[in-house]
Image (cartoon, rainbow, N blue to C red):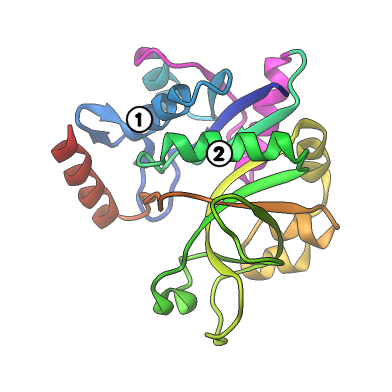
Amino acid sequence: MPKTLILIPSRLAATRLPGKPLLKIDGLSIISHVFRKAQQSSIGEVYVCTGDKEIYEDVINNGGNCILTSKEHNTGTDRILEGFEKLNLFGIDYILNLQGDEPTINVEDIKKLNSNACENKSDIATLACELNIKKKLIEENVVKVQTEKKLTLKNFSKAIKFFRNSPDLDSKNIYQHIGIYQYKSSILKKFAELKQTKDEKKYRLEQLRALDNQINIDVVLANTVPVGVDTKKDYMEIKKLMEYKS
């Protein structure tokens, strides 16, 4: 089985919810909740990559692994590449980039992404879920992906395009994208070295850089829909849900 490393990029300077990674849910920071979910997947070693000492100290103090990177990164992908190079680990075939603001991510979906990427020798693989509410098609903050074939829980398909809104409600094979990526280690470096494309800048979607450079992205159907923490309202809702369950 190929060897996978999980890296979680994290920073304090979120525009809509400053200090987000260190907000507490049931006494534990959001970033440390995500770290523990990644560990529970038992895929491989897990590290948070951050340019902020406050995040570094929180993760370490909660028993996690963390590596300090430069603060001056434009994207999370750039940050995890620096982290990967600094770790200098031997024999890593894949890097799984897990978002640091999704404490409700399903551990089984992390495992599923990894197993599909490894079995299919994907250059890049990502997750998507059913788009059950049509109004989400025109919501800017809900990223969509269109695939070549219909997704099922037993198959995957290549991404055709990613977008933020669509007036075409009858388009086939459109799903809600989940921003988790698994890269071949060689592809991660290649991707980070490519210049940002016009589509990437226009639509504010980093994954378009891969498609614009003929790098395939395989899409795997997730079992659940994780809820990201982007606003104070999101935080309060997730905090209430997770603390109730515990």
Q: Nearer the viewer, residue 147 or 163?
A: 147
Which residue in the protein does label 2 denote?
112
For image coordinates 69% across by 21% down, the residue present is 3
Q: Position of residue 193 (x, y in %)?
A: 82, 43
Q: In this rendering, is residue 164 above or below 59? A: below
Q: Is residue 22 magenta?
A: no
**Residue 196 visible in the displayed image:** no
Structural crowding at the residue carrying mark 2, measured as other residues with C-alpha within 10 Å and reported as few (<14), some (14–19) or many (≥20): some
Q: Quarter holding the N terminus?
A: top right
Find the distance from the CA under tag 1 to the CA under tag 2: 20 Å
Structural crowding at the residue carrying mark 1, measured as other residues with C-alpha within 10 Å and reported as few (<14), some (14–19) or many (≥20): many
Residue 124 figure quarter: top right
Q: Position of residue 7 (x, y in %)?
A: 58, 29
Which amino acid does the dot numbered 2 rest on? Lys
Q: Is residue 79 left or right of residue 237?
A: right
Q: Is residue 71 magenta?
A: yes
Lower sequence index among marks 1 and 2: 1
Q: Is residue 205 left or right of residue 13?
A: right
Q: Quarter holding the C terminus?
A: top left
Element at badge 1? helix
Q: Position of residue 26 (x, y in %)?
A: 19, 31
Which residue in the protein does label 1 denote?
33
Q: Position of residue 43 (x, y in %)?
A: 56, 23
Q: In this rendering, is residue 62 above or below 192? A: above
* Numbered range of the magenta stretch: 61-89
